[in-house]
Amino acid sequence: MSSRRAFLSLLPLTAAAAAAVPAATPAHATGRRNAAFVASTWQPGSLTLAASGKAAPLVVSSADHPGVLRVTGDLRDDIERVTGTAPAVHHHDGLPATSAREIVIIGTIGRSPLVDQLIAGGRLDVSGIEGRWETSLQQIVDDPAPGVDRALVIAGSDQRGTIYGVYETSRQLGVSPWYWWNDVPARRRERAYILPGRHTQGTPAVKYRGFFINDENPALGTWAPRHFGPGHAPGHAGGFTSAFYARVFEVMLRLKANYLWPAVWGRAFAEDDPANHATAKEYGIVMGTSHEGPMMRGIEEWNRHAGGGTDPYGGNGEWSYRRNREAIERYWADGIRRMKEEDFEGVVTLGMRGNGDVSLPDGDGIELMETILAAQRAILEDAGHLDVPQVQTLYKEVQRYWDQGLRPPDDVTVIFCDDNWGNLRKLPDQNLPERSGGYGLYYHFDYVGVGRNYKWVDTVNLAATWEQLHLAHQYGVDRLWVVNCGDMKAEELPLQFFLDYAWDPGHWSLDRLGEWERAYAETNFGPRHAAEIAEVLHTYGVLQSRRKPELLNRRITVDPDTGEVRYDDAATPYSLENHRELERVTAEWEHLDDRAERIAHTLPAEQRDAYYQLVQYQVEATANLYALRAAQFTGLLYARQGRAATNALADAAEARFADDRAMSDYYNTTLADGKWSGFQTQPKIGYGDVERYGPDAGWQQPQTPDHQVLPDAIHPAPRRIDVPERAELGVAVDGSTAWWPDATEPLVLPEFSPYQTAPEQYIEIFNRGQRPFSCTVTPSEKWLKVSHSGGPVGDQLRVTVTVDWAKAPRGRTRASITVRGPNGATARVLAPVHRPEVNRHELKGFIEAGGYVAVEADHHTRAVGAGGVRWHRLPDAGRTGAAMTPFPVTAARFAPGAGPCLEYDLTLFSTGRLRLWVYASPRNNVLPTDGLTYAVSFDDQPPQSVNITAATGADDTTMNKQWARNTSDNINLTATDHTLTTAGRHTLKLWMVDPTMVVQKLVADTGGLRPSYLGPPESLRLR
């Protein structure tokens, strides 16, 4: 946006602020089972699917599953979308006599007489397909019927196997799974051919794969009833209908998902439209209910009919097993009866939580939960439904039962959960016997709760997510995976990755993430721009995962004496004064937005709506939000200093807010001819305003006490000041919150070093009045250089300061710079300078400068393995670069100092005490140990062991402030103290203790480290 770029000129950005952003993960393409079988050019043995205005007829048996009959119509529509020609659809139970020389046969093994005849006649080999779960085959068969030369046979081992085989054909033709949800046009081709060969997409690694539509108000909850009509339950117009869910079920199947937890915010799947369960059955979807909805009944079914001391089952209306047991059990029995009568496929949730996604009001004793589970199993047995799949989800406080020894019946799948922020909480103890029900995973891309809601746009780092999904799969969690994807729309990329990985974890290894990103971009936008779009999306995920956008007005600090975690919901987490941090991250977002906008201008008009939804909106709106926050918080700082530029930044913040509103209005009214009316209504800027909407403002979205969302607003509000009609000098410096004339002592710049990588130090000369003035800037030494020796000052002038190192004296020196302004005003700035006595060629490793050494974890000097375990690089999985984690992740724990080690050669000029900060991903202790642990040492000193769980005090069950700090800041930050008696070369060693440790960065503070969110830039490395 040109107006935002005009604003950025108000901020004192420099070229150094536009730091480079990590590139997409390189991928090395290899042969794959899921090879392409659709082509635009004929090859010997090919089948012509469509050409010259004709298309091969589609033949399906009327005896096949309803989902197969339905998907055949989708294939017809997809072929027409791509080629402009719709094939005829024939329903035959026997191989047809037809004038067409080439046909497409679609059917399920054991259900379709068409397919079974080909198998019986030896014409179709289904070995490796038949009897498997959800497995597909695409194969050309010669002479399948009299008068037919060849047929493409799309066969499945079961109903969904056939459906997936059809939709894979559609995808390869050029129809995106998101064609409807994101208005992605089909890639047109005049001719489409099926290549010879036997093609399969294999059998899924995870049996049940799906998602949870949740936290759907206001966005989806506003849009869906407008688009599809109100819910059918009296008094509940906001319910979602079967027309809505039909669109959800279709995209699920196109993504090879099979399992759904339906929306629950004031919604009841079975009541909002009586056809909802029947529609799921028609599509072949497995239905479930969330962790708070046992026995195939969402909690809203209870809430709608119970209360005021009564309920429909003769009870007192309480959702309490102790106080309303008989009514609750009858309510559950009704859910199972309905499931059996309506004959839909489902997974039954066992257990019980409190009403409203909270813990049970009856207490958390194991005996109570054992009684509940036994009662539910008895209900299932009485209904003859004990053989249906069942799960117990260990969400939040429910995990305590498992930790204390409760074990559900062996055939029940135990669902382990993340902490709502993408960090697993528990994995199966490898010493336990195998469970016939196995283990599952409940994960989050969206969340409402402690810390702060995040539900606006995708904030997922694929490499970090891969690491956690890989960890789960390696520990045998493979029966059921479900992810909370909020509104679903806006989480397309991570949701598709989650489902692709669940299907075939072995295929999507870490080094193929770049390939996956490019394939995703190509599916939606074609090959021409796929690489550059993938690069934008990759960079977006890296930048966005640093911090949820909803948290950009919360600074979290820890009291150094008491350890108390403190929130400030009127402050930026990024530093305004150190390392130009807020400037640099704002510039990174602006650079990404420039790239996204350039691509948009090169795309054909028909792709731009899809591009706006899948790429451009989230990039541009987030860049705009960072620009808003930069103007807002810089302006609040300026107001405290009385700067004349204050009011212009208040104007700029409000202009950025207007830009945000304009983008939302475009999304809601113009995009895709108004199709998405009401969707872009999610607040993300006004969190934390207690005065506006009450004590929950720290975590909850802006809303009224009855949960009606409030319009977004800027919090804290921009501030304006009265600027006097005079000229008045003010001075501020890099690295300090002090400013002149407020400060009584001279201002001090950060220490200069010939080895510094931090941005150049600067002095800001600002006007505290309306009238311009002239200034002079005079260094005390000739080797101290300034970018401006003086000049006019309207609002402000930034002067960068550098050192001519060829002329500066060796050792430590303190020079000064004198700033003179109107009316004889004079400010003095000190410039500490350190030019070490040693020559550059004598230095090795990472070099101390400015009182610290900072190292990205993957830039180790040596990685030393032990016992078959090695450190493995996770590209771009950290906030500022790659991360390192041990492989295999199932390795045993090592004693401190005995395991694999990362070694970093450093050169230090300081001696004595230093503090080492280790930046680790905010992982929880998933293994049966006393806490997630690593060890560190210098040189030959004994390793110091650090239990991150104990050191941070984080509790992922109670979700205390220490835990919320780690997840909100997306880092576990721990420190150890060390003493080094000599300057020169040293080796820092980081030792693996636990195999689930993920380390991102190490910073040795020798006395000059200044606070910042991301930590200082990496130190200079000399080899």
Image: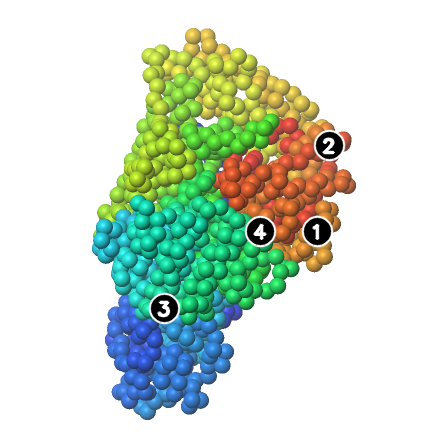
Tell whether 843 sits left or right of 120: right
Cα distance between the residues tagged 4 and 1: 23 Å
Q: Earlier in the sequence, mark 4 or mark 3?
A: 3
Image x and y of residue 1011, in percent: 55, 30
Cα distance between the residues tagged 2 and 3: 70 Å
Cα distance between the residues tagged 4 and 2: 40 Å
Crowdedness near tag 2: few (<14), some (14–19) or many (≥20) residues, C-alpha within 10 Å:
few
Q: What type is the residue that disc 2 sits on?
A: Thr
Q: Earlier in the sequence, mark 2 or mark 1?
A: 1
Mark 2 or mark 3: which is in front? 3
**Which residue carries the number 4 mark?**
403
Crowdedness near tag 3: few (<14), some (14–19) or many (≥20) residues, C-alpha within 10 Å:
some
**Which residue carries the number 2 mark?**
979
Q: In the rendered structure, are the residues bearing label 2 and label 1 in contact, judged by CB atoms less than 8 Å apart? A: no
Judge by depth and name the residue closer to the eye, 881 or 532.
881
Mark 4 or mark 2: which is in front? 4
Crowdedness near tag 4: few (<14), some (14–19) or many (≥20) residues, C-alpha within 10 Å:
few
Q: Report the coloring of the rendering.
A: rainbow
**Which residue carries the number 1 mark?**
894
Image x and y of residue 738, in percent: 51, 19
- Residue 20 in sight in this render: no
- The residue most toward the top is 823
